[in-house]
Amino acid sequence: MRIRVHAGGGGRGAVSFRREPYVPRGGPDGGDGGRGGSVLLFATPEVASLNAFTGRREWRAEDGRPGAGGRKSGRGGADLRLAVPPGTVVTDDETGAVLADLDVPGTEAVVAAGGEGGRGNPHFRSSVNQAPQVAEPGLRGEARWLRLELKLIADVGLVGPPNAGKSSLLRSISAATPKVADYPFTTLSPELGVAELDSGRRLVVADIPGLIEGAGRGAGLGHRFLRHVERTRALVFVIDGSGRDPWAVLDAVRHEVAGYSAELARRPSLVVINKLDLPETRALRARGGHPDALWCSALTGEGVPEVLASIDDMVAAAPLPPQVEVPPPVHRLRPRRTPAEPPLVERHPWGFLVSGEAVERLVARTRFDSETALHRFQVALDRLGVSSALEDAGAEPGDTVRIAEMEFEYRL
């Protein structure tokens, strides 16, 4: 699932002065703008799928409100909280970086941070300017494309070709009621069931839709199906014992799993030959061919208790699956005051491009509809060395200068 999220922008700071009787020099009292709302995703078992995002691709948090006189700060924008099912992995669609793995109910992650609010004019008061007419606009909130992937969290994954009886086996060992029919691809989406054991333990079992040849390379919906068993602790290969060559089918299924993930192919596994109620399957068992295979009939229940007991023993001894690597959260601390890096000036056919963190932040923090702010902006450019860098690069009056998303005309 691919969605676009926009955090709220910060509110602008206010230019205001205290005015009341008997206070002739009240001074600046413009309030700061409120911070924009952030976009958060949180995992909750009350949501079972990502269907809520199918009809709407863009999600926006609220902007911060502007500041006001009397040092009144603007209200911060409300955060936008989006519910996703546990097991959702959040990836930046442009960079491919994993932003969050919401595998436990209650976990949450900020996927787009709101912009800071602009400062009001009291922040610009100085010994030489007691009545500043300058305030800052708020910064834009983050915006990015996200890819949401749901990977079911289960103890065991039932894997096999279409129509092998995986759904029937899930029905026989749990209270799940997946659709069962005598034709391939009856199951089109993963199903979860909870198996109650005599010991009182519970096992969560996932029925994965049937795999076809080439599934490990993404044929059909192979990758979409196989990703759901990445979190399982063990695999159960379910094979139709009445088919033409069940052992060749088993090898083919193992090959597809290994083609998708070598680590997944090394997980603990069992082989279950289903449809023991049919004469072809009984004849296959009589001939042998796989000493470790378990035999059952999901339809009649024959052999199912033994299969469930073996699954329980396997899961109890299986290690936990590897976790998705998520970078540690970035703690936003107030940076120390360090000299700003000199701006980078690049010459292009259309003019000059000026880049650098300090100069780009200056553009974002300037209100260009204010003459006072424009004067302050020019002074700051000189202080950052932009003017001298442009002169050294050969800029002439009338040339176009671009900084971030703003374009200016170069003048001496």
Image (cartoon, helix red, strand yellow):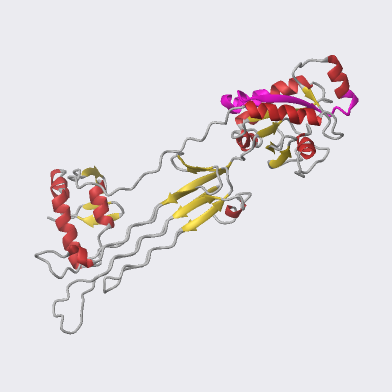
Which of these two is toward me, 390 or 373? 373
**Residue 236 picture location, percent across and down:** 70, 29
User: Which residue lies at the image location 73% right of the left edge and 24% below the top edge?
Assistant: 271
User: Which residue lies at the image location 14% right of the left edge and 77% below the top edge?
Assistant: 25
Which of these two is toward me, 396 or 88? 88
Q: Please tell me in which quadrant of the rendered image residue 240 appears.
A: top right
Compared across the picture, whether 245 is left or right of 97 comes to right
- Is residue 297 at least partly visible in the picture? yes
User: Which residue lies at the image location 46% right of the left edge and 54% below the top edge?
Assistant: 39
Compared across the picture, whether 63 is left or right of 174 comes to left
Q: Is residue 190 above or below residue 293?
A: below
Residue lying furthest bottom: 21
Q: Is residue 114 above or below residue 267?
A: below
**Residue 169 picture location, percent across and down:** 78, 35
Q: Please tell me in which quadrant of the rendered image residue 257 appears.
A: top right
Residue lying furthest left: 128
The quadrant of the image that shows the C terminus is bottom left
Residue lying furthest front: 199
**Residue 78 picture location, percent across and down:** 44, 62
Q: Please tell me in which quadrant of the rendered image residue 330 appears.
A: top left
- Is residue 352 at least partly visible in the picture? no
User: Which residue lies at the image location 65% right of the left edge and 23% below the top edge?
Assistant: 255
**Residue 244 picture location, percent across and down:** 82, 22
Q: Which residues are magenta?
A: 254-280
Is 354 one of the magenta-colored residues?
A: no
Q: Is residue 220 above or below residue 126?
A: above
Q: Is residue 214 above or below residue 41?
A: above
Q: How many marks?
A: 0
Is 278 one of the magenta-colored residues?
A: yes
